[in-house]
Amino acid sequence: MPYYQLVPAGPFWAIRVGYGCTVEAATTGACPYGARTMKNSIKTRGQGSAVTLTFNVPGELADVFDFVVAEDILPKVLTGYGFLPGVVRTSSNTGPWDTPGSSRTVHLADGTTAREQVTAYERPQYFGYRTDRYTFALRHLANSATGQWWFNAQSGGTHVKWTYGFDSKRRLTAPILILFIRLQWGGYMRTCAKNVQRHFTRR
């Protein structure tokens, strides 16, 4: 069951959502590695909104990085959540996926698309990307979004931090974007994380 905790985050507050153990165990680091603990925190400032997910993966650092940022990964891990369809394929790659500046078109199960571009590739610890040109409903709420992944080796596997920040289209629609993140996008990210964990658990 998830838990919810309001925590201070600089000049604003963040909502932390934890999965897999109690609030006390998660905040003191007492959760067993096998509990697959996940924590979400949503931060807002001005017209921007970001959600951060942290979780553990039972795999070697380089293996986890290579799996998560592989060119063919999206249909394997972004399988959908709630009203958000999964990714079925990508197309129109402009260059190698380990090269900043390369971009591609992401195709969702409902026929809509978005553009994704690599902004940073620092194997095996950091990967960054940007999405925009949405053809689905998100185009009314956000101009673009920036994703960042950090990977750190730890006893028993790899600790992963994933942040996804949205640039709200206008201040008036920012509250709707925040609601979308809380009700849908956070779950979309958790589904992805669980799929990554499941891949390494099966090995």
Image (cartoon, rainbow, N blue to C red):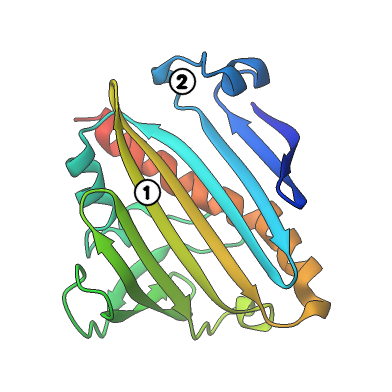
Instruction: Tell which residue pokes out farthest to the front in this image.
Output: 10
Question: In x, y percent, where is residue 18?
Answer: 61, 32
* Amino acid type of the residue that numbered disc 2 sits on in the rendered structure: Ala
Labels in figure, total: 2
Q: Position of residue 174 (x, y in %)?
A: 76, 71
SS class of the residue under badge 1?
Answer: strand
**Between discs 1 and 2, the one toward the N terminus:** 2
Res. 111 in view: no
Q: Which residue is mark 2?
A: 35
Q: CA distance from mark 1 to mark 2?
A: 20 Å
The residue type indicated by label 1 comes to Trp
User: Which quadrant does the C terminus fall into?
Assistant: top left
Q: Is residue 202 left or right of residue 10?
A: left
Callout 1 crowding tier (Cα within 10 Å): few <14, some 14–19, many ≥20: some
Q: Residue at x 45, y 75 (%)?
A: 131
Depth order, front residue of 40/100 = 100
Q: Which residue is mark 1?
A: 150
Residue at 66% across, 58% down: 181
Q: Nearer the viewer, residue 13 or 182?
A: 13
Q: Residue at x 37, y 64 (%)?
A: 128
SS class, disc 2: helix
